[in-house]
Image (spheres, coloured by chain):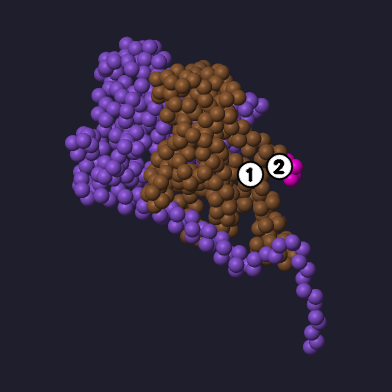
C-alpha cells in the first residue's frame, strides 16, 4: 500500500481555531462559572442572614413589631404588606391582563396588532423608578382627592376603606404594581393563547358556538397552564419590586388596618433602612432579604415550570422580569 | 313531516333536532353574551394602554422643561442652590453600564452557546437557574453586590454597582443568546462540519453570524433592563453629587437620582427628577424599540 502525501488543509481564517475539546472545555468552564456565581449568590446571603436567625430565633420572622432601638425586629408587618400589595396588583392584573391578551390574540385587526402589542410590552421597559415618580407626584394627589373618597363612599361598608385619604398607601402601591406587572401577564398569556390549535377553534365554530363561547370553552381551557404560569410570573415580579413601591406605599412599620393605610414591604424595608443599619439590624435586613429571596425563587420556579410545560421554552425572556 | 312508514323515530335524529332547537332558541342570548364579553376584553385593552400613554405624556411634559445645556453638562447642586444638572448621574450610569456589559455579554453569550449545544442534566438545571434568576427580586442582587464587593473592598463603588447590574443582565443575555443560537438551522452547522471546520470555527463563522440579529436584540434588551435598575445600585454605589469617572469610587446614577429627588420637598429638585426620568425613559424606550426594528431589519436582510 502506498501512501500519498496530502498537503495540510489550508487555513482560511486569520485566527486559528481552538481544537474541538478545547472549545468544548471553554464552554463548560464558562457554564460552571455561571453556576458557581448563582451558588455564591445564595450562600453569601444565607451566611450574612444567619446571625439574625441565631440571635433572634426563627420566631423573629413572625414578630409584629419593628423597633430596632428596642431590639425588636418583627418582620410580620412587612411580610403582610408585601402579600397585600401584591394581592391588590394581581387581583387587578389577572382579569385585565387576560382580557387584553384575548383582545390582542383574537379581536384586534391584523394591522393594529403589532402596534398595540408593542405598546403594551413597552410598559415593561419603562424603568420602575419612573413609575414610582409618576405614582408619587401625579397619581397620589388624584387618589387622595378623588379615587379614595369615591371608593370609600361606595365600598366603605366593607370596613376595608377606613381611615383618612392620604393618597400614598397600600392601594396606590397595588395599583402601581398592577400597571408594572400587566405587560408580563399580557405578553405570555397572548403567546399561549395564540398557539391553541386553530382546528379546535374552527371545530367549535362549526358547531355553532359564538366567538365568546369558543374562547371560553375551547381556547382558555387549552391555554390554562400557560396562563397560570404568566400569572405566577407576574406575582413574582410584584413581590420583588422595590423602588416604585418604596416611593408610593408610605413606609409605615405597622400592620395596615385598611387598604388605604400606609404600609411597607420587605424590599421597601431593606432599601429604606439599609444605609443606617449596623449589627443586628443589618443582619435582620439580610434575613428579610433571604426570606424574600426564598419566596421569589419558589414563585419563579413554579412559574417557569408551568410556562415550560406548555412548551413555550423562551417565554418571558426580555419581557418578564 | 310525516313518515310513510310508521317507523320508530331515529334517536340520533331526535337528539340532533333537540340540540338544534335549543341552539336556535338561545342564539339571541348567546350572541348578546358574546358581544358583552368581547366588549369587556376591548375595555381591558384600553385600560392596559392608558397607563403607558399617561406615563409617557406626563414624563415628557414635566421633564422636557428641565432640559437645557446645564442639565447635561453640570453636576448636581445641593438643595437650595439654583441650577446644576445631572452630568454626574449620566457619567455614572454610562460607566457602570459599560463595565457591566463588557463583563456580562461574553460570559452570557458563551454560556448561551453552551446551553444551545447541550441537553444534559447540568444544562437543563443551568437553563432553569437562568430563568429563575431573571425573576428574583432585584433588591436581593443589591444585597449580594454589597456583601460580595462593598464588604470585601470596604468601600461603596461603581464597580460594585456594575457587578450587581451585570448579575441582573447575565441571565437575560444567556437565555436570549441560547434562543438565538438554537434558531440557526442544523444544516448550516453540518455543512460547515462536513467541510472539516472545527467546532470553534463553526461557532465563530456560522452560528454567531447567523444568530446575530437575535443576539443583538437580547443584548440591547439586557442593557435596557440594566439601565433602569435602581434598588441594586442604592445598596452598592452610594451616590455622589460630584462628577466621578473612576468606578472604584462612589458614583451617582440616573435611577438613584430620580429615586432620591422624587421625594424631596423642593420643587426644583423634583423638576430635575422629571428631567432625569425623561432622559432615562427615552434611552430605554429607544433601546427597546431599536432592538426590535434592528432584529426585523437584519432578519429580512439575511433572508
Instruction: Tell me, yes or no, if residue A112 can be seen here.
Output: yes
Q: Colour of chain A?
A: purple
Query: Is label 1 on the same chain as label 2?
Result: yes
Residue extending farthest to the bottom is A1
Could you tell me which chain the residue with mark 2 belongs to? B
- Looking at the image, residue A104 lies above or below residue A30: above
* The N terminus of chain A lies in quadrant: bottom right
In this orientation, which residue lies closer to the viewer: B6 or B244? B244
> Residue B216 shows which numbered tag?
1
Say what secondary structure mark 1 lies in: helix
Dot 2, how many residues are within 10 Å of its Cα: few (below 14), some (14-19), or many (20+)? some
Taking the magenta stretch, the answer to whether it contains residue B292 is no
Q: Which chain is brown?
A: B
For discs 1 and 2, the disc positioned in front in the rendered view: 1
Image quadrant of residue B114?
A: bottom right
Q: Contact (CB < 8 A) between labels 1 and 2?
A: yes
Left or right of A47 on screen, residue A304: right
Left or right of A258 on screen, residue A246: right
In this orientation, which residue lies closer to the viewer: A8 or A56? A56
Q: What secondary structure prevails in the magenta region?
A: helix
Q: CA distance from mark 1 to mark 2?
A: 10 Å
Magenta-highlighted residues: B299-303
Image position, residue A117 (x, y; %): 58, 30
In this orientation, which residue lies closer to the viewer: A87 or B276? B276
Residue extending farthest to the front is B81
Image position, residue B61 (x, y; %): 55, 18
Dot 1, how many residues are within 10 Å of its Cα: few (below 14), some (14-19), or many (20+)? many
Q: Residue at x 70, y 42 (%)?
A: B299
Image position, residue B98 (x, y; %): 57, 44
> Residue B298 shows which numbered tag?
2
Say what secondary structure mark 2 lies in: helix
Amino acid at each position: 500500500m502506498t501512501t500519498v502525501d496530502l498537503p495540510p488543509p489550508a487555513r482560511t481564517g486569520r485566527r486559528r481555531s481552538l481544537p474541538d475539546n478545547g472549545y468544548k472545555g471553554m464552554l463548560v468552564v464558562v457554564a460552571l462559572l455561571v453556576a458557581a456565581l448563582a451558588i455564591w449568590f445564595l450562600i453569601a446571603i444565607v451566611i450574612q442572614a444567619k446571625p439574625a436567625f441565631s440571635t433572634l430565633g426563627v420566631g423573629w420572622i413572625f414578630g409584629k413589631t419593628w423597633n430596632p432601638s428596642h431590639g425588636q425586629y418583627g418582620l410580620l408587618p412587612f411580610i403582610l404588606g408585601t402579600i397585600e400589595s401584591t394581592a391588590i396588583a394581581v387581583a387587578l392584573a389577572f382579569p385585565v391582563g387576560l382580557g387584553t391578551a384575548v383582545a390582542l390574540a383574537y379581536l384586534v385587526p391584523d394591522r393594529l396588532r403589532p402596534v398595540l402589542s408593542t405598546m403594551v410590552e413597552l410598559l415593561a421597559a419603562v424603568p420602575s423608578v419612573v413609575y414610582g415618580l409618576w405614582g408619587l407626584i401625579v397619581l397620589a394627589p388624584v387618589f387622595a382627592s378623588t379615587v379614595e373618597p369615591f371608593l370609600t363612599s361606595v365600598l366603605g361598608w366593607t370596613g376595608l376603606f377606613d381611615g383618612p385619604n392620604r393618597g400614598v398607601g397600600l392601594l396606590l402601591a397595588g395599583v402601581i404594581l398592577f400597571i408594572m406587572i400587566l405587560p408580563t401577564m399580557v405578553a405570555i398569556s397572548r403567546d399561549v393563547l395564540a398557539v391553541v390549535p386553530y382546528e379546535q377553534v374552527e371545530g367549535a365554530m362549526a358547531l355553532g358556538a359564538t366567538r365568546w363561547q369558543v374562547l371560553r370553552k375551547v381556547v382558555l381551557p387549552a391555554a390554562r397552564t400557560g396562563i397560570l404560569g404568566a400569572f405566577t410570573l407576574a406575582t413574582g415580579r410584584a413581590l420583588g419590586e422595590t423602588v416604585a413601591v418604596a416611593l408610593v406605599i408610605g413606609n409605615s412599620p405597622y400592620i395596615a388596618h385598611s387598604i388605604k393605610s400606609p404600609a411597607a414591604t420587605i424590599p421597601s424595608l431593606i432599601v429604606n433602612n439599609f444605609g443606617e443599619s449596623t449589627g443586628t439590624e443589618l443582619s435582620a435586613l439580610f434575613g428579610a432579604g433571604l426570606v424574600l429571596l426564598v419566596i421569589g425563587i419558589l414563585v419563579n420556579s413554579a412559574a417557569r415550570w408551568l410556562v415550560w410545560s406548555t412548551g413555550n421554552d423562551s417565554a418571558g425572556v426580555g419581557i418578564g422580569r | 313531516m310525516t313518515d310513510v312508514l310508521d317507523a320508530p323515530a331515529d334517536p340520533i335524529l331526535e337528539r340532533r333536532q333537540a340540540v338544534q332547537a335549543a341552539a336556535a332558541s338561545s342564539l339571541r342570548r348567546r350572541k348578546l353574551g358574546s358581544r358583552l364579553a368581547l366588549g369587556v376584553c376591548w375595555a381591558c385593552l384600553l385600560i392596559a394602554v392608558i397607563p403607558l400613554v399617561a406615563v409617557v405624556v406626563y414624563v415628557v411634559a414635566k421633564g422636557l422643561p428641565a432640559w437645557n445645556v446645564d442639565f447635561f453638562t453640570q453636576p448636581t447642586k445641593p438643595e437650595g442652590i439654583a441650577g446644576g444638572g445631572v452630568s454626574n448621574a449620566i457619567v455614572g450610569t454610562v460607566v457602570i453600564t459599560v463595565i457591566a456589559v463588557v463583563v456580562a455579554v461574553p460570559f452570557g453569550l458563551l454560556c448561551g452557546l453552551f446551553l444551545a449545544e447541550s441537553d444534559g442534566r447540568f444544562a437543563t438545571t443551568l437553563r432553569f437557574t437562568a430563568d429563575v434568576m431573571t425573576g428574583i427580586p432585584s433588591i436581593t442582587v443589591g444585597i449580594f453586590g454589597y456583601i460580595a464587593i462593598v464588604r470585601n473592598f470596604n468601600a461603596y463603588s461603581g464597580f460594585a454597582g456594575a457587578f450587581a447590574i451585570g448579575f441582573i443582565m447575565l441571565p437575560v443575555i444567556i437565555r436570549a443568546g441560547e434562543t438565538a443560537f438554537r434558531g440557526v438551522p442544523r444544516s448550516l452547522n453540518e455543512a460547515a462540519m462536513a467541510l472539516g471546520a472545527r467546532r470553534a470555527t463553526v461557532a465563530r463563522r456560522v452560528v454567531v453570524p447567523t444568530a446575530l440579529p437575535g443576539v443583538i436584540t437580547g443584548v440591547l434588551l439586557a442593557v435596557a433592563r440594566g439601565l433602569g435598575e435602581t434598588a441594586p445600585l442604592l445598596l452598592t454605589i452610594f451616590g455622589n453629587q460630584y462628577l466621578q469617572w473612576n468606578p472604584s469610587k462612589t458614583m451617582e446614577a440616573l435611577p438613584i437620582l430620580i429615586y432620591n429627588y422624587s421625594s424631596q420637598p423642593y420643587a426644583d429638585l423634583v423638576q430635575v427628577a422629571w428631567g432625569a426620568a425623561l432622559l432615562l425613559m427615552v434611552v430605554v424606550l429607544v433601546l427597546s424599540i431599536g432592538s426590535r426594528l434592528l432584529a426585523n431589519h437584519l432578519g429580512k436582510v439575511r433572508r
